[in-house]
Amino acid sequence: MAEFTHFNDEGRAKMVDVSDKPETARTAIAHSSITVNHDIFEKISNNEMKKGDVLAVAQVAAVMAAKKTWEIIPMCHPIPLTGVDIAFRWEEEEAGHKLMISASVKTKGNTGVEMEALTAASVCALTIYDMCKAVDKGMVIGPTYLVEKTGGKNGDFKREKEVQ
Amino acid sequence: MAEFTHFNDEGRAKMVDVSDKPETARTAIAHSSITVNHDIFEKISNNEMKKGDVLAVAQVAAVMAAKKTWEIIPMCHPIPLTGVDIAFRWEEEEAGHKLMISASVKTKGNTGVEMEALTAASVCALTIYDMCKAVDKGMVIGPTYLVEKTGGKNGDFKREKEVQ
Amino acid sequence: MAEFTHFNDEGRAKMVDVSDKPETARTAIAHSSITVNHDIFEKISNNEMKKGDVLAVAQVAAVMAAKKTWEIIPMCHPIPLTGVDIAFRWEEEEAGHKLMISASVKTKGNTGVEMEALTAASVCALTIYDMCKAVDKGMVIGPTYLVEKTGGKNGDFKREKEVQ
Amino acid sequence: MAEFTHFNDEGRAKMVDVSDKPETARTAIAHSSITVNHDIFEKISNNEMKKGDVLAVAQVAAVMAAKKTWEIIPMCHPIPLTGVDIAFRWEEEEAGHKLMISASVKTKGNTGVEMEALTAASVCALTIYDMCKAVDKGMVIGPTYLVEKTGGKNGDFKREKEVQ
Amino acid sequence: MAEFTHFNDEGRAKMVDVSDKPETARTAIAHSSITVNHDIFEKISNNEMKKGDVLAVAQVAAVMAAKKTWEIIPMCHPIPLTGVDIAFRWEEEEAGHKLMISASVKTKGNTGVEMEALTAASVCALTIYDMCKAVDKGMVIGPTYLVEKTGGKNGDFKREKEVQ
Amino acid sequence: MAEFTHFNDEGRAKMVDVSDKPETARTAIAHSSITVNHDIFEKISNNEMKKGDVLAVAQVAAVMAAKKTWEIIPMCHPIPLTGVDIAFRWEEEEAGHKLMISASVKTKGNTGVEMEALTAASVCALTIYDMCKAVDKGMVIGPTYLVEKTGGKNGDFKREKEVQ
């Protein structure tokens, strides 16, 4: 049969071939955050939001989003995750109360889980926004970034310090 | 039958009842961003990324994510969107090249589309991260925030200025 | 063009046409349950399960499943739900501790939400099983049944008493 | 705030705004087909395929795909379908036995259901391929095309004759 | 960076880490049931339901649900299933005709498939309810329970007798 | 417990057991096409379609559909794909301009990826239809067929020549 000319070769979207990469243990940790006003901070802490326990729902949303990352990010490879964990920490800032979000993801596979950790952290923050937006729509999400990754032939990554 | 005691009433997650809210035209605009190094900026601009045309793929991902918001954010109501549009703008910053992302969403329904706009903007940034991460994993996403919303009985929202 | 002969007419699966049914307010309530041993009852009550707060996660799962019912049940019509609520009640039985689950669903549409309520109640029970199965796999789910529905031209339905 | 320059305006993917289009009754019918060898024809007719009753499974797959069209086709609007029906007809051709597939879709909405009918017909044929491919991988799907559509301001469409 | 304080450690939902569990062959069988009145029993047996061949559709729904279990049950690990099979058996009971449902699931992985079997059996019953509910809404689903599982380091499980 | 009688054994849909098939490298290539009129050909080539860059969006849709094949085709096994690539070629035909679509899929697993390649090619064509249908609804998709597959114990498949 005639060959296909990749006439738009330079701009062609594809899921790159990872068939030959070995299966190794891989981990990634990503951080995001959401800055809220004092009223929301109080309502989250005292569990008074009308839609429910904000952090409990956000954790569930984050774990489920990690598993769906390959559906949401077009060129991501599907990976069977082996573990997902979400943690929180409040920080006082001039702009308000900042809820730090940490998402840790593990797998044993032939490609990394950076996108799964970043997606989990982002969806966690978005869910908190959703559950509190009836009180104030001025909340700010992020910055969102990779903190570290291990596994794979390209070496590990470790960010020196938190992004402000 | 015996009544259910809402023993965990204070922390119960639920999808709040919007049956009695009228159907009105609604819009929302959210911004996110991704800060990249000079190498990635050049490769995006010149369409040299191995996974494809970065911005074209990110726009598609963002539109599709807007439609899936109700699946990703647990207490979000399903809404049949009538329009989604994504736009970009480069800004030069000290920290690097910052790609500003704007997501506009429209519907005619009984609840707002803030979450759809925020989710679209977030997934747009995440997709760019995915397509460029082979070059540098230090990219930073966001801040991500609502810029404006119209429609609904609670009045419009308009942010005064960009979040830095 | 030639007519299609519905040669397997009697057994043909189809999504029945509801185009001409009027949009009315509709509600449905379904019950399910899960019977657990004393050890699990204690661990749920004291929030000691390794996978997290069992009832909080189960509520989230139930709400999300209600929204996905049309994806899970093949001939179900897609319906934009306007409200979902889940409640619990413990009952002591000879067979063990029985957690009663009630799922209430609302919409304004041209078909009922019985399946959404039944699916939410079922997934709620399945999620509890998942989170407790490391302790005991002998838990029993259900019976699961419709308790009441309102709205639609076919009249309301109200079950007289709980199914044992 | 500064305006976004739609620097890639010509190539920007978007879900076009249909907010102002009126809700009307809409229908679409699409045809596809699959041409199989004599062995497969016999096995389908006698219900001897190892994976199950081929046409029954294909009908279910087609109905479910119609409902998921907005998830599969990036710029498609989500539409709550009100009816989906699939029918079959065998035709004898020189190339083999050709199973004609007809998918009819209905809704009441502000955009048409052509894509839902085409997707249902395509997935119906793909499912038949899947269930018979252990016998022969040489089956050919299609052509697949729109037969007619009604509703909407742009007028109806009616194809004159079957595509060979 | 500062450590995250797991301030809500006791109630934190997470997908537990199974990275170190070995991949072994695993199977699970779950049972559910649906009790229907005589009219529905006749209509299912004679294939006279308006929505199609009830059991054929229910089998397809069950297989598809088994594959989607990780999407439906929040803390479930995604597992690539290698086999799913559904079987039926009618039993005469005082309360009516009881259709027993058996779902068998297989995989080769590092976590069990109990949830996949239970979800398949539940969705099978829910689908039958959906296809027959126009005749009678009084049908009762379940009890639903695990019958046996094999594989994994925690040993096999085998229920002694059917749950009534 | 009593045995289940597979009373509808001949017609039972199931996902066949592949647990004992070895994991090997597998590839598949499928072709589809879409025949468009001169106006559409010009608009695609000059990137003047209102919905965006047609081929860029279609490639993304095709890659995402390949990953979702197990969700769309009922009896398909879920497979973690390792690579997906889409290419195009224009051919001049009497009936109009025919855009040939080639979808290549790779995995390392215990079942083939023919369905993933066929689904990707089909969804690619459907997406092009969607993006151009405002100009002309007479476009024809396909034929769609498998071109080659490698891997697995049943031997390779290679089609001799293009289907017209």
Image (cartoon, coloured by chain):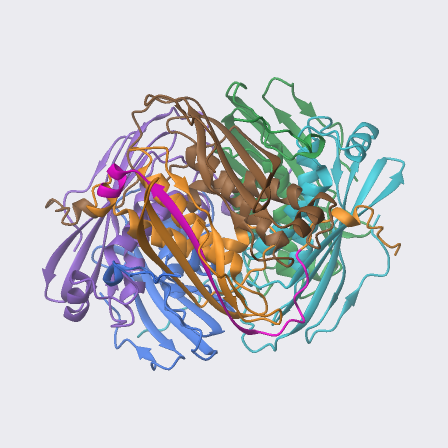
Chain colours: A cyan, B green, C brown, D purple, E orange, F blue
* Picture quadrant where residue F102 is located: bottom left
Establish if C70 lies above or below D108.
below
Report whether residue F64 is seen. Answer: no
Q: Nearer the viewer, residue E33 or D163?
A: E33
Side of B99 relative to D75 (left or right): right
Q: Is residue D6 magenta?
A: no
Residue B112 drawn above or below residue F73 = above
Return the residue found at the far front. Answer: C94
Residue at figure coordinates x 70%, y 36% from the top left: A129
Q: Position of residue D115 (x, y in %)?
A: 34, 44
Q: Is residue D13 above or below residue E108?
A: above
Image coords of residue C23 (percent x, y)? 39, 22
| Whether residue F60 is situated above or below residue B90 in the rendered picture | below
On the image, the x and y values in percent for residue F35 come to 28, 54
In the displayed structure image, the side of residue E64 where residue F98 appears, left or right: left
Q: Quadrant of residue D156?
A: top left
Residue closer to the observer: B46 or F153 = F153
- The number of numbered badges drawn on the structure is 0
Give residue C98's quadrant in the image: top right
In this picture, which residue range is highlighted in magenta?
E15-42
Nearest to the observer: residue B69 or residue B107:
B69
Q: On the rendered structure, is A99 left or right of E96?
A: right
Which residue is found at the position 17% from the left and 45% from the top?
C9
Res B164 visible: yes
Q: Is residue D95 left or right of residue C149?
A: left
| Image position, residue E122 (x, y; %) | 44, 49
Depth check: D62 or C91 in front?
Answer: C91
**Quarter of the image that includes the N terminus of chain A:** bottom left
